[in-house]
C-alpha cells in the first residue's frame, strides 16, 4: 500500500484519518462532493470514456496501400502543429521508440502525407515535414478525431480547461510510471 493511501486511511503517523475533505465543483447547482465521491465517479467514467475514444478514433483511411489509423494521426497532428522535426524529437514527443516512429513514418510517407530528408546540419539525422499540399487533407482527417474533445472543452471555462488538462497530465504520468506499489 502506498504511503499516500496509508495516510488517507489512517492519517499521518497512524492515527485515524479525518473525514474526507469536501470540495465543491464550479457549478452552483452541484452538491458538496467528497474526494471519495469524485474518485468513485471517475472510476465509473473512465471505462465509458475509453470506449468512446476507441469508437471515435481517427477514421482509418487507405491511401496508396497504406492503412492509416490513430497511431498515424498522433504523429501527423504533431507535425502539423509544430512543423518539421527530427525523427528522434518526434519519437520523444510521442513517447515511442525510434523503431516504432520509423514504421509510422514509412506508412504516412507511402500515403504521401510526409517527406523525409537528411538534416543539413547533421546528415545522420532525418527531418520529417508534412508533404507540400497535403496539410489540408491531414487537417480534415484529424479534425474528425478531435471534434468530441473540442466540443467538451468548449463547455468549460478557461480555468476549468486548464484544470482538466492538468488532471489528465497527472493521470497519464501515474498510469505510465514505474511504481513499486502496483498490484502484481
Image (cartoon, rainbow, N blue to C red):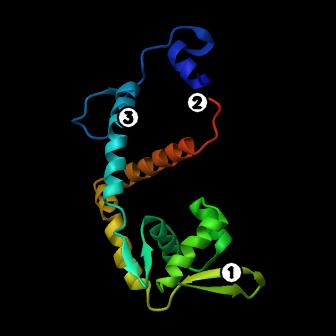
Q: Earlier in the sequence, mark 1 or mark 3?
A: 3
Image x and y of residue 137, in percent: 38, 83
The spot of residue 57 in percent (x, y) is: 36, 62
Mark 1 surroundings: few (<14), some (14-19) or many (≥20) residues within 10 A: some
Q: Is residue 66 above or below residue 57?
A: below
In the image, is residue 49 above or below residue 7? below
Q: Quadrant of residue 149?
A: bottom left
Identify the image quadrant of residue 59: bottom left
Of circles 3 and 2, which is in front?
A: 2
Side of 65 relative to 147 (left or right) = right
Label 2 residue SS: loop
Element under label 1?
A: strand
The single residue placed furthest to the front in the displayed view is 65
Residue at 60% from the left image edge and 65% from the top image edge:
100
Q: Label 1, label 3: how many angstroms apart (C-alpha)?
A: 42 Å
Is residue 49 in view from this perspective? yes
Residue at 47% across, 71% down? 77
User: Is any atom of residue 157 visible in this view?
Assistant: no
Image side of residue 79 versus residue 149, left or right: right
* Mark 3 vs mark 2, CA separation in Å: 20 Å
Residue highlighted by disc 2: 184
Relative vertical location of residue 184 with respect to residue 130 in this rendering, above or below: above
Secondary structure under tag 3 reads helix
- Callouts 3 and 2 close, C-beta under 8 Å: no
Say which of 183 and 74 sits in front: 183
Q: Which residue is labeled 1 in the image? A: 126
Can you give x and y, in whole percent of width and height, for residue 15 in the image?
Answer: 56, 8
Amino acid at each position: 500500500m502506498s504511503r499516500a493511501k496509508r495516510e488517507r486511511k489512517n492519517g499521518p503517523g497512524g492515527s485515524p484519518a479525518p473525514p474526507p475533505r469536501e470540495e465543491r465543483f464550479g457549478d452552483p447547482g452541484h452538491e458538496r462532493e467528497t474526494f471519495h465521491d469524485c474518485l468513485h465517479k471517475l472510476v465509473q467514467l473512465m471505462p465509458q470514456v475509453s470506449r468512446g475514444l476507441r469508437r471515435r478514433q481517427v477514421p482509418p483511411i487507405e491511401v496508396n496501400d497504406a492503412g492509416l489509423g490513430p497511431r498515424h494521426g498522433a504523429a501527423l497532428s504533431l507535425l502539423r502543429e509544430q512543423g518539421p522535426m527530427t525523427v528522434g524529437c518526434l519519437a520523444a514527443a510521442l513517447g515511442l521508440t525510434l523503431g516504432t516512429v520509423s514504421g509510422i513514418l514509412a506508412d504516412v510517407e507511402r500515403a504521401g502525407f510526409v517527406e523525409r530528408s537528411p538534416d543539413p546540419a547533421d546528415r545522420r539525422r532525418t527531418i520529417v515535414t508534412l508533404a507540400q499540399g497535403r496539410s489540408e487533407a491531414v487537417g480534415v482527417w484529424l479534425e474528425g478525431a478531435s471534434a468530441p474533445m473540442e466540443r467538451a472543452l468548449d463547455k468549460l471555462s478557461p480555468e476549468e480547461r486548464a484544470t482538466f488538462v492538468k488532471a489528465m497530465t497527472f493521470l497519464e504520468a501515474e498510469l505510465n510510471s514505474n511504481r513499486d506499489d502496483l498490484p502484481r
